[in-house]
Amino acid sequence: MALSKREQKGFVVLSILLISLIIFYFLTPLIFYTRQNRGEVNDMLKDWIDSVNAINSIEVGSKPDSLFYFDPNDVVISKLQKLGVNGYALINWLKYRESGSRFSAPEDILKVYSLDSTLASKLIPYVRFNTKIVKNEKYTQASAVKNSKERVFTRDSSSVREYENKRIVSKDIFVIEINTADTAEFAVLNGIGPVLSSRIVLYRAALGGFFDVEQLKEVYGMPASTIDKNLKYLSVDSLSVKKINVNRVALRQLKSHPYIDFYLAKAIVEYRKENNSIKSVEEVLSFKEVKPQLKNKLAVYLSVE
């Protein structure tokens, strides 16, 4: 059935209207997408990228700076890294020791999951045990080098026993200073993997540093029990906390702090404008916008100069 000219025109107009509505529907979000929205999304993307980079950074290995003799049961993190042990290999090495297991022969380092076999083959000849725990007689060491001097210790000599009594073999070497530790060091702790370790570092940056180990429990997804069972491996240098000068910091920076919400940030800025400056931290702490449970914590991070 043929359409009349009038019906044909009506059909064309209706088609144009439908196409216009479809285009308007899809373009509206782009038209009204404000600069502020883009800024918020960009910030979210940046946080996500930083988180991913923090996780990936512990997976990147490096070539050894130089090879030197070491005891796999006692060697500290910094020296393992100089030997080229990084990323998950470093984490698994330390967790192997934390589990109570010990390396008894040089080849035992091959038990470390994720340790590159080529690197392991280079390290095995440099393994030296400072204790009497040696599984294979051919690897018994007749000497131990300390700095530039040599002292001879044999497995059956009294010198070995004297040396072992004096040497410190404790988990103190694993104590982590939480304001300077990186993600790889946090991941060594029991119950903390790469995700939680990256969150700790990001939260620390947002705070400006920790003043108390208990603050680790505030990290998103962190079980309080995990921190409790790791307390003996943690320390904090509260002097490294970065303070916020409430007389100079901008609103956006204020509200980005975990202990300061938008309403408190706004109150600080408005009070500062009305009074030219804030004379003491106590003035801020007296604001009704300060949450009672955060008052003492917030005081650590505020400064008026």
Image (cartoon, helix red, strand yellow):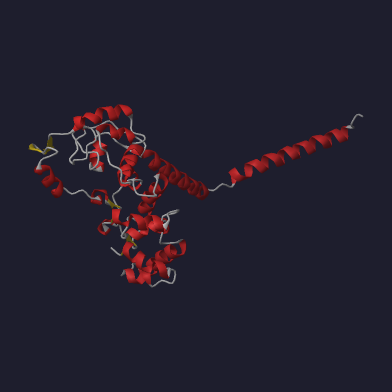
Q: Residue at x 39, y 49 (%)?
A: 192
> Residue 294: x, y in percent?
40, 66
Residue 303 or 157: which is nearer the viewer? 157
> Residue 173: x, y in percent?
23, 48
> Residue 203: x, y in percent?
39, 53
Quick one: which residue is furthest to the right in this view?
A: 1
Q: How many marks?
A: 0
Residue 234 visible, this angle: no
Q: Residue at x 71, y 42 (%)?
A: 21
**Residue 209: quadrant of the picture:** bottom left
- Left or right: 143, with 119 as reference point: left
**Residue 146: quadrant of the picture:** top left
In which quadrant will I find the N terminus? top right
Above-or-below relation of 201 to 59: below
In which quadrant will I find the C terminus? bottom left
> Residue 140: x, y in percent?
17, 33
Residue 3 or 76: which is nearer the viewer? 76
Residue 173 visible, this angle: yes
Quick one: which residue is furthest to the front in this view?
A: 156
**Residue 112: quadrant of the picture:** top left
